[in-house]
Image (spheres, helix red, strand yellow):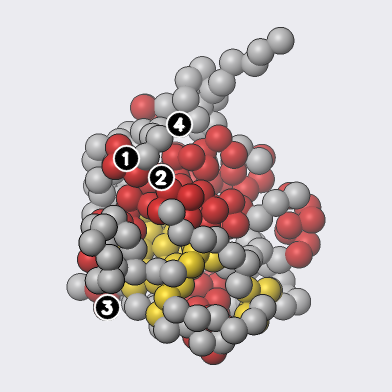
Amino acid sequence: MLLACCCIVCLEPGPAICATCAGKFRAASPFPQLPGFDSCSALVDYTGAARDAIVRLKYRNARRVLALFGCALAELIAASPSTRSTRSTRSHTPHADVVTWAPTSKQRRRDRGFDQAELLARAVARHLGLPCRSLLARTNGPHQTGLTLAERLDGPSFRARGQVRGSVLLVDDVITTGATMIAAAGALRAAGASAVHGVAAAHTPLITAPAAPVEPPLTMCESPSSVLKVSPASSEKEK
C-alpha cells in the first residue's frame, strides 16, 4: 500500500512543504558578525512554519525537507559574493574546497539515529558539487537545546579530526547565539583552515518583529538554479 505524501508543517496532502506554508517563511534577519568566519549567512528566521519544519526534521525524522533546504542553501551560497570563488570561471562555484558540519552531541545522535546538521551539509555539498567530510568531533558536553541564553554563550567544544587545508564551508541547522558555530570555526582555524564560511538553514531572531517573506516562496527543486532567490541574512562583516 502506498502512503500519500503530505506537508510536514500542516500535514495536508502535497509536497514536503506546501505553497501555503512556504509562503509563511520569513527571510532571516541580519545578525552580528561571528568571530572566526570570513562570512556567515542564514536562510530563514527560526520562527513559525520554518521552525516547525526544522523541528520535525530534528525530532521526527522528516527527511523529505532536506531536498528543499539543501537546494535553497546551495543557491544562497552561490549567490553570495563573499563565498564566490575567484579561482573558477563557474559563477556558482563557492570559494570553498570542502563542506563540513558542526556535529551534534553523541547522545543526540544516538537518540535520533542521525545528525541533522550532517544531513543538511551533505545535501548542500551534493548541490554544489563539493566533497563533504567529517572534519570535526564534538567533545563531551551538554547539548544546546533547553539551555538558557547565558548557558548557550559558553558553547560546546570541538576538535579537528586532523589537519585541515583550504577553505571550509561549515553548515548547521540553526544559529541561536552563534556559540556552536564560533567554537566549530575556531577548531577548523586551529587545524589549518585558510578560510571558514558558515551557513545555516535558520537563525533565531534576537527580537521578534514583522519580517519580509521569502520571495518567491520556497519550492522543491532538482537544481540550485530553480530555487528561491533571497537576500541572505549575513554577519555585519559582509556589509
Mark 3 residue type: Lys
**Disc 1, disc 2: CB below 8 Å?**
yes
Q: Is residue 182 above or below residue 101?
A: below
Q: Residue 237 got which mark? A: 3
Residue 21 in the figure: left or right of residue 174 = left
Image: 227 above or below 151: above
Q: CA distance from mark 2 to mark 4?
A: 14 Å
Residue neighbourhood size for the residue with mark 1, other residues' Cα within 10 Å, grouped as few (<14), some (14–19), many (≥20): many
Few, some or many residues within 10 Å of mark 4 (<14, 14–19, 20+): many
Residue position for label 1: 227
Measuring 73% from the left and 49% from the top, which residue is drawn there? 112
Q: Please tell me whether residue 5 is drawn above or below residue 213 in the rendered image.
A: above
Q: Residue at image x 52%, y 42%?
A: 66
Q: Which residue does the numbered mark 4 point to in the structure image?
A: 17
Q: Nearer the viewer, mark 4 or mark 1?
A: 1
User: Which residue in the structure is indicated by mark 2?
Assistant: 71
Element marked by disc 1: loop
Q: Quadrant of the N terminus?
A: top right
Is there any visible trace of residue 238 in the rendered image?
Answer: yes
Q: Earlier in the sequence, mark 2 or mark 4?
A: 4
Instruction: Tell how many labels.
Output: 4
